[in-house]
Amino acid sequence: MNRRVVVGVDSSTQSCKVVSVDADTGELLQLRSAPHPDGTSINPERWWEAFEQAGGGAAAEGAGNVLALGVSAQQHGMVALDREDTPVHDALLWNDVRSAPQAAALTEKYGASMWAEEVGVVPVASFTITKLAWLHEHRPELAARVEQVMLPHDWLTWNILGRPAEATTDRSDASGTGYFSVQSNEYRLDLLEAALGRATRVPRVLGPSERAGLTQSGVIVSAGAGDNAAAALGLGAEEGDVVVSIGTSGTVFASTAARIVDPSGSVAGFADAAGGQLPLLATINGARTLVATAGLLGVDIERFGALALAAPIDADGLLLLPYLDGERTPNLPDATGSLTGMRRANMRPENLAQASVLGLVCSLADALDSLRGQGVPVRQVILIGGGSQSPAVQKIVADVFGVPVVLPAPGEYVALGAARQAAWALDGDFPLWKREIATELEPSTTRDWAIDVRARYAEQRALIYGV
């Protein structure tokens, strides 16, 4: 059988994953990956090396009957290039919080309502515009050299196409910059220039099914997308589905037609990769909260999970606010984690493990409530990401969220979404691939314990951080 093959790329914080998929059925044919260096800033060439190592270069050359390719990547990263197309500074990633003062200054200068109404997001340290403002303030000699600004997925697509004169992006990724208006579907170059201190080129924004171009071997390259928008595509998320992803970060988002305006900045009014909206909340502290607690306890992640499962479901009153790396939701870039409710009787390894799991899930439940508060319907949660596979997380998540939770069959849904977009660009019609559900979880009839834990979590968050 001569299959038609499309390829999806997920260039995430931690690694580059490349999937080969049957264009007609969505069947996964191959998955390869290569790691990225750890850290909050990186030379973009490391992304290209991982892309090549994971087989992306061969796919772009049409190996294995590949007809089309799509790229998704971590959002917000600042790739600032000079006139020789060389980065003037390492790319600052979404989880680099050094630009928190610039985010606050931009919000104060223009007002949170303006940002929410006209742009769709209120600046936080994650967004590209704040990183450009940091560059202008702290490294003005580098800011003066910037001729073009891209995002990680833009930069990879541009390199795959041989660095054409005009780079491209899509609405979903552009909407996370802070200088693209989701409301008008146009760049706000006045905001970009004010932040960077000079005018600069930006990629052209493509529609959901448009083609960015062809590789030298004739492989179609689609518009690409931000990672969360690609995940929504890969999952086939519909109205009423809210995706909760527990990876390096935690994300809570939905693909919807509703316009989101949140001057508080809690809910970012991003665009999705299908022409609609993608209201989203992100937490900096995802599954690494569990990994860090396992390290503190001196156990591997499997033993950590066993400890959590052995604890009382409420951790016997022990509670962790998991802001170990600062936090974005709530916006507390300088926060640290806080362990509360400590008594001599409950200071046991299993309770600490369970408190870590509870803290992670309560943090995501807060984000889910914020999304619901914006009028986004929540019929069920689709739970994805490496942390979703933890039995300790699965044991409590439906009770803490208070809605049914489904876990799709394990898969690389960001990369799958990029592949689905590639198939869309190939044929011109959105591919109707089937989503397989592996696990369904329902809230229990005795979830009062979860309500009590969430109330204590909210009380301690307000007491310690005032939010």
Image (cartoon, rainbow, N blue to C red):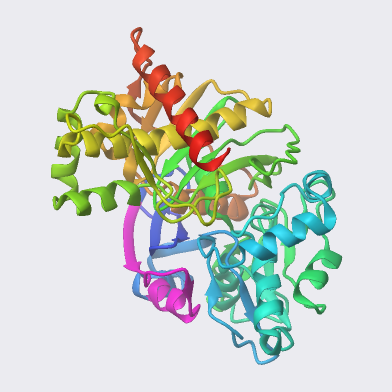
Which residue is the extreme one toward the front? 344
Q: What percent of the width, then of the height, locates residue 405? A: 41, 25
Q: Does 41 lie within the magenta span?
A: yes
Q: Position of residue 63 (x, y in %)?
A: 40, 70
Coordinates of residue 120 in the picture (x, y in percent):
75, 47
Image quarter of the C terminus? top right
Decide which of 456, 240 is in the foreground and name it.
Answer: 456
Write the residue at 35% across / 7% down. 445
Residue furthest to the top: 445
Residue 425 falls within the magenta-colored stretch:
no
Task: Kindly indicate the quadrant of the structure image that contains residue 129.
Answer: bottom right
Q: Which residues are magenta?
A: 29-52
Q: Is any part of residue 376 visible from this angle? A: no
The one of 354 and 426 positioned closer to us in this rendering? 354
Q: How far across and down, in percent of the image, does residue 216 sit?
A: 56, 79
Q: Is residue 295 left or right of residue 58?
A: left
Tally of numbered tags? 0
